[in-house]
Image (cartoon, coloured by chain):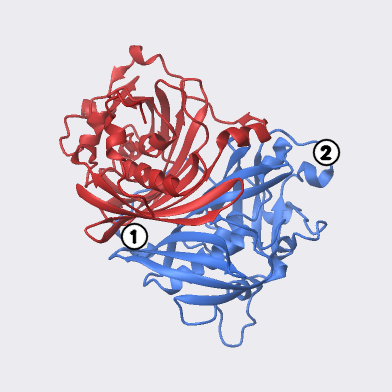
Chain colours: A blue, B red
Amino acid sequence: MGGPGDKQSEFDAAIALTGDGPVFGAVLDGRWNGHEGAHGGLLLSLATRAIGEVLAFPDPLVVSGLYLRPGSPGPVEVRTEVIRAGRTTAFGQASLCRDGKEVLRATAAYTDLTAAAARDGRFYAGIHPPDLPPPEQCQVLQRAANPPISFAMRIESRVTELPGWVTRTPPSGNPVYEGWMRFADGREPDLLSLPLFVDAVAPAALELDLRRMTTVELTVHLRARPAPGWLAYRTLTRYLADGYFEEDAELWDSAGRLVAQSRQLALVLR
Amino acid sequence: MGGPGDKQSEFDAAIALTGDGPVFGAVLDGRWNGHEGAHGGLLLSLATRAIGEVLAFPDPLVVSGLYLRPGSPGPVEVRTEVIRAGRTTAFGQASLCRDGKEVLRATAAYTDLTAAAARDGRFYAGIHPPDLPPPEQCQVLQRAANPPISFAMRIESRVTELPGWVTRTPPSGNPVYEGWMRFADGREPDLLSLPLFVDAVAPAALELDLRRMTTVELTVHLRARPAPGWLAYRTLTRYLADGYFEEDAELWDSAGRLVAQSRQLALVLR
């Protein structure tokens, strides 16, 4: 995470751990808040990092989180468990507790993605990166106007068309957002940052005129180590019914590879 | 699960629990084997059922499982934990252990889907049930020719076109399967059966000429209690790279509602 002379990035500071495990300490920093307490994707990146500390493989492969309560800024205890240390895959779990109350329960698998790629080179893509002009030709998606959502200041986002919640025009009815993202402070994306990024886009369900929602569960597949540069994203909702909706996200790196695929189940709030 | 005079269905027998919890007993029945030991979807249904036993809500809403080892037929211990009992959602966990070794780690959220539907009636569908002729006009997909895969005898499947692995023609290159499914013994589908059903279709990645694969993680969203009758399914793979692929499934009930949406990450085996 940078050489001795480097200033630590905002993200690395936010997922920093203390202690030797299996119980770690961390601090939820108010600069990474979503609508209600700590941003859900940031919490999942923090849990993924903690699980990686107790497993012998370098690369997170898949992580699932159950969102139990909002996490207010302040110290958290991160309890980890090695579920299974296999030969090609290791499995672990983390619980994030704030004031003794569990905020997030996450389970993850880690592997060595380089070794996996060497074992099987077959490729198929039924999905493709969004067809976007270069970031320099896109508009800046400014979310700073909404002060409690401080995490949006940590991430730069560019889009071809500003959404209705910015231009104050009615929702389109088409729940798909595409654009570019990167850390505002210039830190390059890595696997640990992808749980954050998949959840860092505004929910496409805003285009269905939903206003408030909360994540119940979020699963992220981590498919490749991202190349430096912007991430292209596509996020969409396929089904809303009976007070719940699913939201999928894809992240593509600057080399055009799919680096993360995620799906969450969210509850519509009144 | 049926009145006193009813014969227990094959599925209810397969997910039967003994004991009062939080640790339950169950038996992996060799009649529900996949390629390597107990069928993964069946294991997830069993874990979901066990979690439901210790939570105060009627309906499983989302369940995620990490597949740690194959589960050979025989007795298993199912350890459950209440993670959080909230007002509208409760969260729990289950570990399935065979001979002291953990086979599956699952986490789930339960709720009351009827109450959720009453709270918010908005609806959007960007996906639709597959356009299939009635089951009576479809072909029976016979999987009994492959003896170790005994679970396929427990489930009836109908398709419009037999896949290449049945007709011994080359894979199509298009990893999508659609068709109908139901229990062979006439048991009606319910929420607990959906983790089984989402994983009961042959992997669409067979159409990419993959032969052997194993599930690393499977997450299922349970969206509505299925109406009696056939389930229509669509299963597809969107991305295969570096030895891993994702597979999504949708299940639609006889009333045309989406009842389950799932995604798994699978490892290609040589």
Q: Earlier in the sequence, mark 2 or mark 1?
A: 1
At which x and y percent is residue B139? 29, 17
- Labels 2 and 1 touching (C-beta < 8 A): no
Give the answer, above or below, for where B26 lies relative to B126. Answer: below
At which x and y percent is residue A173? 71, 33
Asked if badges 2 and 1 are on one and the same chain, I answer: yes
Where disc 2 sits, the SS reads: loop
Q: Which residue is mark 2?
A: A169
Of residues A155 and A266, the one nearer the viewer is A266
Of residues A224 and A270, the one nearer the viewer is A270
Q: Image point 21% across, 58% down: which residue?
A: B99
Give the answer, above or below, for where B32 lies relative to B87. Answer: above
Amino acid on which disc 1 is placed: Ala
Tell me which chain the residue with mark 2 is part of: A
The answer to whether residue A159 is seen in the rendering is: yes
Callout 1: few (<14), some (14-19), or many (20+) C-alpha neighbours within 10 Å? some
Where disc 1 sits, the SS reads: helix
Please identify the quarter of the rendering in which residue A146 is found: bottom right
Q: Image point 60% across, 39% down: which residue?
A: A245
Give the answer, above or below, for where A91 lies relative to B218. Answer: below
Q: Return the mark for residue A116.
A: 1
At which x and y percent is residue A210? 72, 39
Amino acid on which disc 2 is placed: Thr
Q: Residue furthest top?
A: B137
At which x and y percent is residue A166? 81, 47
